[in-house]
Image (spheres, helix red, strand yellow):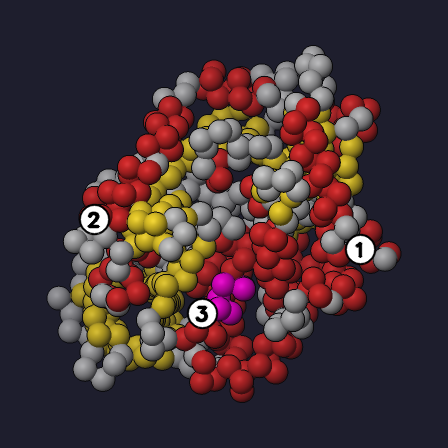
Amino acid sequence: MSNRQTETDVILIGAGIMSATLGTLLKELVPDWKITVFEKLASAGEESSNEWNNAGTGHAALCELNYTAERPDGSVDISKAIDVNEQFQVSMQFWSYLVNANLIRNPQDFIMPLPHMSLVQGAEDVAYLRKRYETMSNHPLFQGMEYSDDPKQLMEWIPLIMKDRTSNEPIAATKSDSGTDVNFGALTRMLFEHLKNQNTDIKYKHSVDDIKRTSDGSWELKVRNDHGQVERHTAKFVFIGGGGGSLPLLQKCGIPEGKHTGGFPISGLFMVCNNPEVVAEHHAKVYGKAKVGAPPMSVPHLDTRFIDHQKSLLFGPFAGFSPKFLKTGSMFDLFGSIKPNNVLTMLAAGAKNLSLTKYLVQQVMLSKEKRMEELREFIPNAKIEDWDMLVAGQRVQVIKDTDIGGKGTLRFGTEVVSAADGSIAALLGASPGASTAVSVMLEVVEKCFPQHVKAWEPKIREMIPSYGLSLSENPELIQDMHASTAQALGLNSNSKLQIAR
């Protein structure tokens, strides 16, 4: 037992993309603040941010159909897509600033140009996709999107998917050449390497056991190192960015804003292909429609991935259920998160989501051959020997009592929960998560340091030129931004359309 006690300005819990982003922002805004990071694993970016646990889509809402719901009158609501795209553009601007300032190098190690496509079958879905395309392509954020229901054109775009297709069902796709594949694991490691060079104290193999308020309003953390010794660390501000592990820590700190909140863990599997002949036939991220009853993060997609400069294909995700909140977590995580203040919330969520539970159980029971059948809806001639199974990261969906959904509403997305005085904040939820990290961490900065924001604004604008502006309402800014981020991040090959305009 160690009685070591250390004071610091800021503590970040979890060495994933969110802590990496917040730490980097704060180091640019106030370089002299002392920042300490605690991570229970041996290195950065090993859980949800890891490249094999994260789809790396660079969620810009170009291809994800769950962001563009069809209204009862048949029109398509693209407001969520606009919101997600604007948030991704903020991330792109921040990464460009870091590259231009030589704070990180070799952007091709974490981001590559890659078309984003949506693909549907059946007359009803084809009609929906056409309406979606007509609505989106008229918006300045989505200019350059293409649509086709011509099998010859689709054969050029997606030969692997169209080859040997025997169905006579109508089929259509949209294609956006401004999409990307992002290796969030590599980016996280780069940012932590940069933070280490900025005198940030990064402690790996350190688990946070408890968080308590001190009499002077600071937070004291009880931290256990890999030798089992306990240390005490205090800070004026704490950020809990531990992925699925954030909820138990939020509950321990006891702030009223964290009450009546639960988490529902969803696991996933991908199929991965490393056969170079098959991989060479596909160059895009292609998203389909989720099956009825499936959660939004289970939208089937066939992705080209660039990991360690190797190109591979991933198909999935197949959803599943595990009570763990982290891939490296405990089988008791879910049970341990049920507290007197959220038990009714959790029970209500269970009653409301019986069909989801049934769906997850069915997914767990699927054999490899059954999974191959789903893959063959995308790739008709897929061979079982070309594909291996890969366990993806755990995602913990937020359960809350809401005005619209009532008690025990299961929420899909990313949420920040912060204390009224801004002294502690926690990030909960999942997709679009990593892609919107910069916007979400700016929200933390605004909520938790309101007294500094005015003074910091010029620096924030230097890092993110569109800060405080709606891109949708400033189309000329969109063109400038697409050109400058493409230049900085080496994406010119996928941005010719945008730059030409």
> Of 355 and 311, which appears nearest the observer?
355
| Label 1 sits on residue | 498
The residue range painted magenta reads 438-444
Kind of residue at badge 1: Gln
- How far is the residue under mark 2 from the one under mark 3? 28 Å
Can I make out residue 396 in this image? no
| Mark 1 residue element | helix
Identify which residue is drawn at 77% across, 50% down: 138
Q: Position of residue 314 (x, y in %)?
A: 56, 33
Kind of residue at badge 2: Val
Would residue 484 appear left or right of 448 to someone viewing this image? right
Dot 3 crowding, Cα within 10 Å, few <14, some 14–19, many 20+: many
Query: Which secondary structure type mostly characterizes the magenta part of the structure?
Result: helix
Q: Are marks 2 and 3 in contact (CB under 8 Å)?
A: no
| Label 2 sits on residue | 343
Give the farthest residue toward the right. 500
